[in-house]
Amino acid sequence: MDLEEQYDKIFRYCYFKIYDKQMAQDITQETFLRFYSRGLKLDSGGNLPYLYTIARNLCVDEFRKKPAACLDDIGEEAACDTSGEWIDRLALRSAMSRLPPEERELLFLRYVNEISVAPICRITGISRFAVYRRLSKAVKHLKDELRKEGFSE
Amino acid sequence: MELVIDRVSKQYKNRIAVDRISIKLRKGVYGLLGENGAGKTTLMRMICGILKPDSGTISFDGMDVGEEDYRAVLGYLPQDFGYYPEFTGQDFLLYMAALKGLSKPQAKQKAEKLLQLVSLQDAAAKKIKTYSGGMKQRLGIAQALLGQPDLLVLDEPTAGLDPKERVRFRNLIRDLGKECIVLLSTHIVSDIEHIADTVLIMKDGQLVYQDQWTDGRGSLEDFYLQHIGEDNKQKHTFS
Amino acid sequence: MNRHLQQALQKAYKIPIPDQQEKARFMRTLPRSRISTWQFILTQIAYFRKWTLVLSMLFLLPALLGARHIDPDTLWIISSLIPFLGLLAVAESTRSAVVGMQEFEMSTRFSLKSVILAKMSVLGILDILILCCLIPLCHVSSNISLLQTGLYLLAPYLLTVNISLCLTRRLHSGEAIYSCMFTAVLVSTGSWLLHLTADFIYQLSYLHWWILLSVFLTGRMMQEIYRTVRQTEEYV
């Protein structure tokens, strides 16, 4: 298990919940510290769900403290993106934001952070069957939203 | 992060190789200069826990050099080395990773990353006996970096590297010096001139000079020659 | 979900870490996972040369062939071949010094000392097991006592191991291997010749000499092992 890669993924996960880069980095580090303080190891990936659970709980705590800061700050991105891709990215994120939070979370964990289904079951606490079902529903939902914006697959 | 060397001495038969050396090293790049026989390699091997000092102590953040935990934060590139002939570059790194106590999955990742860092990823699957001298040296440097050492000891690391490789190596060392203690010994003064924060000069087993070196101070070569005595000038070739 | 959409999603959510240096600094503070001593020993076994293990196992062939194929001569054949078992063990244990890998192995967490001890222990145990299989087998087919059988197999083995360890300690290169091979051949031929020409030595009246010899060689072997391991601590 590549620790550096996991750091990046957890950071990404946290940022897109609280939209504060510095805070996201702090939470990421706190997540790892708490994970290790329990005596756990990340060697084989069996303990990955714990990492995400810790991160998610910390984000929820943070969100409760500052609920206002949930604006997707695309200004910075647009400024440094020369290819104009940021419009597509914004559209995609915007479509995702119109999904219910649980569906968005599932899509993020499965397809953005590329976590396999078994750990997702443990992170979200729902059964394998339910995960598959909700995932396919979420994907369909996302495609519908994208079609509404005029994007084809 | 501090390496404390306290009154360390080593004697061989009738010759004193290292004579009561005391230094404290912190994060940064330290260049160790000295002629052959000045005791550089002996001192470095004592720092690596390979030789036992006759007197004095060496410790890193409170850990004595003999402890396993000390060796766990150490990366060493020796001056002369061999290898098991059947090893490929990658085999070698994986084997060394095992010796350093890394688990197999960790070892694989680290090996890949380091091979890229020293630009050996294309030759990784080839046997080491097909490597050029410079490639072997780069592999040795990669091995020293396994296990993310806090203390990096490099004995003549730039020997056999061509000028382009040497420049890349200097940049690498400069970056590493921001994170850990790097001690490198070399005959090539220009290497030290450009990357060392502190210069240490050894002569006859003693530390005759230890101070920071900044770019504006003129030629390190001249300074070095001054320190070890003009009459020794003929013995040296500098590149 | 198709690949195109997934890639687009990943791109959409790609965000750079604000402070890479901070990340690097933090990553260094995390505990590094360590393998246990047992896992280390297993790793070393995995790195044994294949033919060391294969050839050592060949010594078990008589056992596999079964007692029916064993005749009285088997004891003497095995007795003259056993030096090579010792050679394999020593050659594999001290390989690092011979190829120059010891330079790297000396400064690692599991240092050269551990490497050599681990290898010697594993191969030593393997050889003891092999001998434990061979001794009763040879005893059954020959008409001499178990003790004698054991001694006649043990002595050449111990002699070879003793001399080989001493040689690898003093000669640190490819020369060491050739000298050890030569030693094994010498002990082997000597053993066979002794059986052919001076058979009386193997009679009961000389038993106490064999006991003394084996005890002496075992003591010396312990000493040689100790010296070899000590040397790993001071490789100049």
Image (tube, coloured by chain):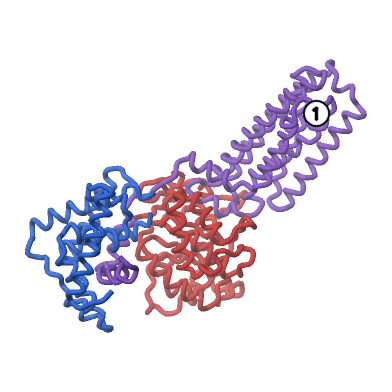
Chain colours: A blue, B red, C purple
Q: Is residue C169 visible?
A: no
Residue located at (50% from left, 43% from top): C40
> Looking at the image, which is closer to me, A113 or A10?
A113
User: Above or below — where is B187 with respect to C83?
Assistant: below
Location of residue C187 by image quarter: top right
Nearer-the-camera pick, C192 or A83: A83
Q: Which chain is disc 1 placed on? A: C
Q: Is residue B99 above or below residue B131?
A: above
Whether residue A77 is visible: yes
The image shows a total of numbered marks equal to: 1
Q: Secondary structure at mark 1?
A: helix
Residue furthest to the top: C205
Q: Quadrant of residue A38?
A: top left
In this figure, which residue is indicated by the disc labeled 1? C69
Q: Is residue C147 left or right of residue C203?
A: left
Q: Position of residue C225 (x, y in %)?
A: 64, 36
Q: Is residue C112 left or right of residue C80?
A: left
Residue drawn at 46 percent across, 62 percent down: B112
The residue lying at 45 percent from left, 68 percent from top is B117
Image height of A37 relative to B238, above or below: above
The quarter of the image holding the C terminus of chain B is: bottom right
Q: Residue C105 at what x, y percent from top left?
A: 55, 51
Front position in the image: C192 or B73: C192
As rendered, which of B176 and C95 lies closer to the eye?
A: C95
Residue B27: x %, y % from top left: 35, 61
> Which quarter of the rendering shows the N terminus of chain B?
bottom left
Q: Position of residue B101 (x, y in %)?
A: 46, 48
- Name the residue type under label 1: His
Q: Residue lying at the far right in this picture: please name it.
A: C197
- Disc 1: CA contacts within 10 A as few (<14), some (14-19) or many (>=20): few
